[in-house]
Amino acid sequence: MESDTHTLTIEPSKTTIKIVARNDEKVAKHEIQVKLVLSYYWSQNLPVVEKFLELLEVVIKNSIFRVFDHDKLRIKYRLRTNDNLESASSIFIEFLEVKADETLFEIIDSVIALEGIDKRGKLSKVTSFRRKINRRIEKEI
């Protein structure tokens, strides 16, 4: 009896995030150059975290689509920051569930941690507990 193997591997390093989707023998690999992408967002005065999350979601959808034809992709993840999105220097993204139509993909290495230089002042650091983000996000793309 043959069983289907549907996996999504997220391999973060200091400079890249590799996204690998597998469906039995089919494999799709994509790589995000983190420093390059974040530098571009900063230089263009774009909302860095929001744009990065959008890019990550699209890369995951495209990777899975290359190995598993689907209409809707449902992604659930937890986003944690040490301040609001504009001031955060520490961002953690933990993927909880990825479904292509009704097919669940097993997630391997589900956490991405981005750490930057903390340029907040003392008062901002002390009061950041009010602005920290710890939310579960569910998207359908």
Image (cartoon, rainbow, N blue to C red):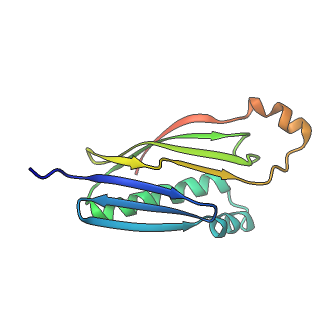
Q: Quadrant of residue 39?
A: bottom right
Pinpoint residue 70: horizontal percent, then vertical percent: 27, 56
Q: Which residue ends up furthest to the front in the rendered image?
A: 1
Pinpoint residue 104: horizontal percent, then vertical percent: 30, 45
Count of marks, rendered view: 0
Q: In which quarter of the image is residue 93?
A: top right
Residue drawn 67% across and 56% down?
48
Query: In the rendered image of this protein, does residue 23 appear above or below residue 39?
Result: above
102 sits left or right of 114 in the view: left
Pinpoint residue 7: horizontal percent, then vertical percent: 33, 53
Query: In the rendered image of this protein, does residue 101 appear above or below residue 132?
Result: below
104 sits left or right of 56 in the view: left
Residue drawn 40% across and 61% down?
20
93 sits left or right of 41 in the view: left
Q: Which residue ends up furthest to the top in the rendered image?
A: 130
Pinpoint residue 63: horizontal percent, then vertical percent: 38, 63
Residue drawn 53% across and 55% down?
54
Q: Which residue ends up furthest to the right in the rendered image?
A: 122
73 sits left or right of 126 in the view: left
Residue drawn 57% across and 34% down?
135
Of residues 96 and 127, the one drawn nearer to the viewer in this rendering = 96
